[in-house]
Amino acid sequence: MSELASRVERIIDRATVHESIEVYASSGTEVEIRAYEGRIENLARASSSGIGVRILREGPAGARVGVAWAGSLDDDAVERAVLEARDNSRFASPDEFTTFASPDGVRPASLELRDDAVRTTPLDDKIALVLGVEQLARHAERIRQVESANYSDYEIETVIGSTNGIRASSTRTGAFLSVEAIASDSSGDQTGWGLVAGRGPGALDPTRVVADAVSRATRLLGARKPPSMRTTAVFSPRSTATLLAIVGSALSGDAVVRGRSIFAGREGVDVASTVVSVVDDPTDSRHFGASNYDGEGIACRRNVLIEAGRLNGFVYDTVAARRAGTTSTGGAVRGGIASSPSAGCRALQLLPGDEDGQAIIRSVGTGVYVESVSGVHSGVNPISGDFSVGFTGLMIRNGELAEPIREATVASTLQRMLLDVTLVGSDLEWLPGLAAGQTIAINGVSIGGA
Amino acid sequence: MNDALVDAEVVGRVLAAAQRRGGDFAELYVEDRETRSALYDQRRVEALSSGHDRGAGVRVVVGDTTGFAHTADLSERGLLAAAEAAASVARGGGGGVREVALEPLRRYATAYEESPETVPKGHSVKLMQLADDVARGEGGSITQVQVGVGGSTRHVLIANSEGLFVADQQVRTRLSVSCVAEGDGGMQTGYRPTAGTAGFEILDDDQVADVARGAARQAMTKLMARPAPSGDLPVVLASGSGGILFHEACGHGLEADAVAKSASVYAGRVGERVASPLVTLVDDGTMAGQWGYLAVDDEGHPGSRNVLIENGVLTDYMWDYLRARSAGRPSSGNGRRQGYQYLPMVRMTNTYLLAGESDADEIVAQTPYGVYVAQLGGGQVNTTTGDFVFGMTAAFLIEGGHITTPLRDCNLIGNGPTILQRVDAVAGDFSMGGPGTCGKDGQQVPVGTGQPTIRLSAVTVGGTAS
């Protein structure tokens, strides 16, 4: 048992007879290196650890939960957190559905989410990697400047334990390489951002991250505002992943039981076109969001949420599941020690179709290619479904990518867009984040421009 | 909690260790933060949460390179280890132990009456129930109300190799109400926050009821909303609806880090006309009580009032200490960080447009057709191109000089330098808008914005109606 796990055991032992306790502890290290103009701009190294404690007390009208957290595993900090969580529980409203997760007999997938190279690779090699990327991008054609090139990695151990018998322990690593390039010509500047991610530095392809950033920046040179129109939009894999993550937030069983989802009460209904199948599968190790356990220490599993356009179900944590009269799907997510579990997706994908991105552009013929989107947090309302985001991209003419466009919006509603998907690409990319993405085509969106 | 987070002698030894291998500048930033939050949803107190975070960040600057390390271990041993890790960027540097002569400790503190930690927990519960009652009382179409309330007290101790030695105590309090209204056309949402750099005394019953009413009405009004238009239109922004426009259209581009890397459309343009002559833009850290207020920034330099654009002419950028130092000028007090785990960056505080001379009602009356925005949401900008988006969460059509039909949510998009030229009317009715959270490079900091009623002659509205 790791040091952290035995620490958690000792905290669990502090529960009194009248209460349940759940402890979420994490401990990790990270490195971040930023390069600029041939030198290291910042080099940051850190280790950190902390705990989140929840204490639950049963009563005649239901259970009450109190929460506390500390950014440290010091005895004093832990002691205070336990006392505060206990005190906070007195103020919660009793609720018949409130409970902690209990083991449900499902065995976790045995995914290897750790790459020891994060620890064993010398710092100098990581520095060389990011300096190399910065230099490669800076010397690319039509690139005026590299705003920054970044390498970062982490290793984090997470332990969840409770008096209900939950014991979940896992260690994961991650490594990221990104670069932001500025392309320039007589029309002005454009930026392009490249990012690759993996479990360790060996998985990061420096050539690809540079090529991505450079092509995104240079192909936008000379971009203009398009006229306003209603047309077909082809979303790039990256834009599709953004869209899918928003759809995923409405597939949270927690949002559904709180009456805050466009999908509430629509199970069994055709909510999307038949080419759309949405799966949340944290047991697929290729997905960056893969995980053995969910945020309550229950085994993660594959959940088919939309099947050939029909709404199949939602992801649930333990409490939302009880409110809905069902059981947890292993769908609890939590944002770290300071946050309580809630239902959410973590490894979404659209099941791939038959055609690749180029073929989709060809068959669409005329429309816009949405390369990257902005203003997602300000322009998308997952409760009403209103969808309006800024984008940069290219016109599609005669089945090919044509002139670049910028300063435009693409708008519809989430409900409409799902029904209007006409093609889903085969070109699935395992992007970092909670959704993978591929090229898709959506009919009848509104483009806001001149 | 006393403010002697770390002994002065230990501070001196840590700074010396940080420069053992050389370095032009070393800094120790110690933070102790208590957080309290509570959530009320579906007429239930879901949970109260208490958090405590403490630790220190050490940075060492060698030439153009910054080394940084942080630790949650505030013992001398822990701090020295962090100093050593931060110093390792100074490879093969000359160095040697340097004495740091610290100034006498300068102390700052937020003025507050009721600390978020000691306010009775039952009081938070009462405020949330009040908000819920008021919001639901606005109409039967309100089906969901969620109330969040909380606050934090942050003690910081900042010392650097130039002798700066500062302690600050920062208290912040926040309450927000989210409502869902349901009608024949589906669900709509309303959201209102209120917050300040102050204690719970700012949350009096009237204020809380006001916020709740505003959130409920926003959701109910939108039940009758029709899709927003799409394309270029005149846009009138109501007083206090969101100086977020200026925050995105030019604020980020006036941050010295973006400027220094030529990643801003405003780089090299001081003294030039960059906006309509009606635009005078200020960033002001000295507004006591405001959400973006700071007595000192996170590098220990006093917040200040900085005029960025005066009558349309670019007058200055915002600065952190190191960039100011290399430019041979004082810091403008804009070096901020989310917490001890982060390096400081140039950030805004309270950014606002000064009042003009037009009459707000006249501005609407003189607009034949356009969009009236009562409330803006968030936004995002690409500082290099100047292209930015900002969302509207409460808006109406203007037809024949009158505010008419409510519109559904959507984004507006524009280019900063172009939009600044299109400010063609500025009213005298200045007010600050709601509290905001600004994200940059993964760090979130509290910011304020403000503006009077203004009109933009044309902005691209990203709706679906043709």
Image (spheres, coloured by chain):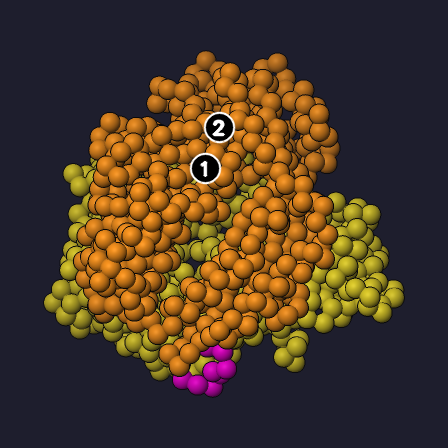
Chain colours: A orange, B yellow
Q: What is the C-alpha distance between the residues marked 1 and 2? A: 10 Å
State the mark number for residue A4.
none
Residue depicted at 82% across the width and 54% down the height: B10
Provide the residue span drawn in magenta. B264-274
User: Is residue A177 part of the magenta span, yes or no?
Assistant: no
Residue type, mark 1 in image: Arg
Q: Position of residue A135 (x, y in %)?
A: 59, 68
Q: Are marks 1 and 2 in contact (CB under 8 Å)?
A: yes
Relative placement, left or right, of B160 versus A162 is right
Residue type, mark 2 in image: Cys
Residue reaching furthest to the bottom: B271
> Do discs 1 and 2 share a chain?
yes
Relative placement, left or right, of A325 versus A146 is left
Badge 1 local density, few (<14 within 10 Å), some, or many (20+)? Answer: many
> Circle 2 marks a residue in which chain?
A
Camera-side residue of A442 and B460: A442
Does residue B314 lie above or below A67 as drawn? below
Residue of label 1: A346
Residue A135 seen by the camera: yes
> Looking at the rendering, which quadrant does residue A72 occupy?
top right
Residue depicted at 62% across the width and 35% down the height: A171
Residue depicted at 47% across the width and 75% down the height: A142
Residue of label 2: A300
Does residue A415 lie above or below A191 as drawn? above
